[in-house]
Amino acid sequence: MKLSEYFLPTLKEDPSDAEVVSHKLMIRAGMIRKLASGIYSYLPYGLKAIQKVEKIIREEMEKAGAIEVLMPSVQPKELWEESGRWNYYGKELLRFVDRAGREFCYGPTHEEVITDLVRNNIRSYRDLPKNLFQIQTKFRDEIRPRFGVMRAREFIMKDGYSFDIDEESAERTYMKMYEAYCNIFKRCDLDFRAVEADTGNIGGSFSHEFMVIAESGEDTIFLCRHCNYSANKEKTEVGEKVCNININEELKPLEKIHTPNKKTIEEVSGFLNVPPTKLVKTVIYLVDSVLHMVLIRGDREANEIKVKNYLKANEIRLATNEEIENTLGIPVGFMGPYKLKNIRIIADISLKGLKNFVTGANETDYHLVNANFERDIHVNEYADISEAKDGDPCPRCDNGELYSKKGIEVGHIFKLGTKYSLAMNAFYLDEKGQEKPMIMGCYGIGVGRTVAASIEQNHDQDGIIFPIPLAPFQVIIVPLDIKNHEIIEVSNNLYKKFREIGIEVLIDDRDERPGVKFKDADLIGVPFRINIGNTYKKENKLEVFYRKTKEKNLMNFQEVIEFFKNKF
Ligand code: ATP
Ligand code: MG
């Protein structure tokens, strides 16, 4: 491709609305342009990077036995009512009405459509298993679209769905997809981890997320230093190993102490000179319209998703001060479980066995000291609802300790089981002619997000440093003086030769100063740059510049050809 004829509008300045480096660089390198909030065009250079990822995905999917289809983006409401998600999915689902008054949505995911397709066309165990995938545009009306194509409203996803006759076969399919995903992200040259994950809006019995390690990631994952346990924060188990604070202490008499204006853990802990580990704090959630009290040790935080999953709730949020005061009649800041009735109280597992703790007295400016479970406070359930912390003992192995990292979720696989097949009657006939529900799985990859995640991991102050597998072009030829006949001729010859041997090559044939050309080449991150200028005039040598390490090598024409022939 000749740069003079290409469509690659690069920018010197960072866009003002970009928070993360991949967003800034994708705009500056002429890969994407915003049309509306969370809605982007892919320009030719960005599209090429997308197509690289898509090609890797297609190859690995087909290798793993998945078959490509393409379903409509527009989906009828009736299918979503069958699955029960029309009301459940909430505002992320973009809904609209056609001229006849029929309701539709723009697909955020395709479980309903694929289940409908398969139930209508597959009847016998002989036609199973089937694993179908597509690469297609999705729409999710995200609350906070940001980070460019990383959290967009319209985005390209590879989504796949599998149908098996039984659990065993479904698990084999799941493992095949797990491996295919590992292969895909390895081939994209990403530093990633597969972690245990929550199943969220999609539902199902278990799942893994593929997380690209990056400081800008919106997710936190925990990893064990000793074994290979790793999980999303929302899923990381906190075991009873954290309950070793003072389980053997003698019970002391309960006291009510005046703690004027001391509300936060820090204030109460400082005022009473008691460590946060001996404070019990209270969080009130509104769970499917009912208030619930959650007790957590002072040094830990409740995790809303863990609470939601434990309670098998549809909707959860923190209760407002008004809701608490009006409904429970207790003062926020001095709340506690003491003598409270008419509310379900769930204690975090970290509180098991804790003795002589401090908690709110349900009276303004008072706390209880030396409170104890059973004797003073009755809780009938303990659950794992607090967030893991760095240094927590590993829930799986004996001596392991957890540490956290930030990650970008690029892929997510779910074992769905019969959630959709039962709701939507996707049955098959087994050998004995009996009807059985198909066992499903689903598998997603954010294609644009994968490109952005790669840029988060591969850049420097000058711009993108594309890893070779995702690079839109592997080489850029930079003739440094386009008025010099000799330089132009050798540049064009090299360009032709590269194209003949199948190397994707750009040539910067613009009438620009070398400095401008170098800056652009660095910004767009082409892995190799070949400078053709003075050294060619003097000694017939071309300068091969490696973007990643900034190494330079002088080679003659034939050596350059050999070098790239070997490389690619
Ligand atoms: P997130 O927690 O980031 O919102 P999700 O769990 O909703 O993701 P899935 O429903 O599992 O995502 O979708 C599959 C994949 O699609 C994700 O792993 C991610 O790579 C991609 N994806 C999801 N939402 C977006 C978005 N708003 N913009 C770009 N890619 C997205
Ligand atoms: Mg989401």
Image (cartoon, rainbow, N blue to C red):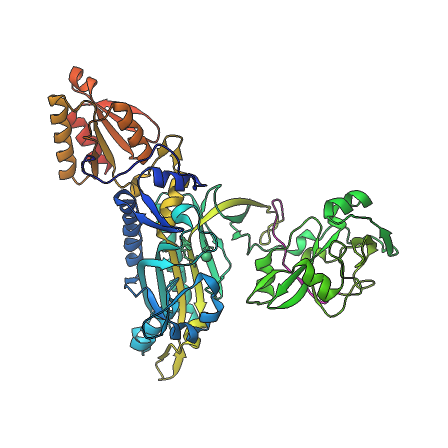
Q: Residue at 77% across / 51% down in the picture?
A: 246
- Please state which of residues 514 and 40 is positioned toward the viewer in this rendering: 40
For the stretch drawn in magenta, the main secondary structure is loop
- Please state which of residues 397 and 213 is positioned toward the viewer in this rendering: 213
Vertical order, 36 against 160 (above or below): above
- Please state which of residues 461 and 86 is positioned toward the viewer in this rendering: 86
Vertical order, 262 against 70 (above or below): above
Taking the view exactly as shown, the residue that stands out farthest to the bottom is: 433
Q: Is residue 205 left or right of residue 62?
A: right
Q: Which residues are magenta?
A: 379-392
Which quadrant holds residue 475? top left
Q: Is residue 44 left or right of residue 248?
A: left
Quadrant for the N terminus in the image: top left
Q: Looking at the image, can residue 367 be seen?
A: yes
Q: Is residue 220 left or right of residue 282?
A: left
* Image spot of residue 79 (x, y percent): 38, 74
* Image spot of residue 379 (x, y percent): 74, 65
* Image spot of residue 460 (x, y percent): 40, 32
Vertical order, 165 against 442 (above or below): below
Q: Residue at 79% across / 59% down in the picture?
A: 362
Taking the view exactly as shown, the residue that stands out farthest to the front is: 99
* Image spot of residue 562 (x, y percent): 18, 31
Taking the view exactly as shown, the residue that stands out farthest to the top is: 538
Does the magenta portion include 521?
Answer: no
Quadrant for the C terminus in the image: top left
Which quadrant holds residue 179? bottom left
- Please state which of residues 182 and 74 is positioned toward the viewer in this rendering: 74
Which quadrant holds residue 508? top left
> How many numbered discs?
0
Q: Looking at the image, can residue 294 be seen?
A: no
Vertical order, 469 against 208 (above or below): above
Does the magenta portion include 381?
Answer: yes
